[in-house]
Amino acid sequence: MSEGDGPKEAAVHDPVEYDGPTVDVPAVDPPSVDVPSPSSEAVSESPIATLFVLHVIVWNAVLLLASLGVLLIAFEGNWNLGGSLLGAAAILALYSVYRWPDGVGWRP
């Protein structure tokens, strides 16, 4: 069998009458918009933004430590390390509740 014996590709012809109706699309200029740049000073000096970032990091650490502690106790039976992680999670949770701002939502 030679190389030329394989299937031949048929030439694709698109006659003009099968292109469909022609539509005139109007040219539109996009509007120009002035976007103000946010000032990084306003965000970094805001005490509520700083406190929010602190709470996000602390509560993520609480969730991680508590989850790992429970998993170590449940699957490995390692009460020393699992209990220590649960204790650290409890201490971080108490710290985060202590740092909760007055007048913002729930306060114990």
Image: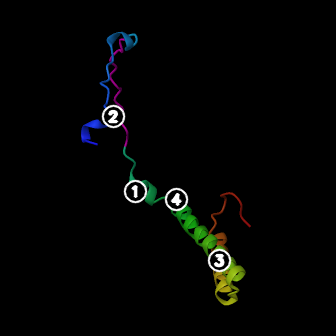
* Image quadrant where residue 67 sits: bottom right
* Image quadrant where residue 93 sits: bottom right
Q: Residues within 10 Å of mark 3 (few under 14, many from 20)?
A: many
Which is nearer the eye, 101 or 74?
Answer: 74
The residue to which callout 2 is attached is: 7
In the rendered image, residue 47, in percent from the top left (x then y), is placed at: 52, 61
Amino acid at the residue labelled 3 = Ala
User: Residue at coordinates 70% horizontally, 88% vertically from top-left?
Assistant: 79
Between disc 3 and disc 2, the foreground one is 2
The answer to whether residue 64 is magenta is no
In the rendered image, residue 89, in percent from the top left (x then y), is placed at: 65, 77
Q: Secondary structure at mark 2?
A: loop
What's the CA distance linking mark 4 and mark 3?
23 Å
Instruction: Indicate whether 100 appears above or below 75.
Output: above
User: Residue at coordinates 35% horizontally, 26% vertically from top-left?
Assistant: 30
Q: Which mark is residue 49?
A: 4
What's the CA distance linking mark 1 and mark 3?
33 Å
What's the CA distance linking mark 3 and mark 2?
69 Å
Between disc 1 and disc 2, the foreground one is 2
Q: Earlier in the sequence, mark 1 or mark 3?
A: 1
Amino acid at the residue labelled 1 = Glu
What's the CA distance linking mark 4 and mark 2?
68 Å
The residue to which callout 1 is attached is: 41
Q: Earlier in the sequence, mark 4 or mark 3?
A: 4
The magenta stretch spans which residues? 22-36
* Furthest residue in direction front, as rendered: 1
Q: Earlier in the sequence, mark 1 or mark 2?
A: 2
The residue to which callout 3 is attached is: 89
Amino acid at the residue labelled 4 = Ala
Between disc 4 and disc 3, the foreground one is 3
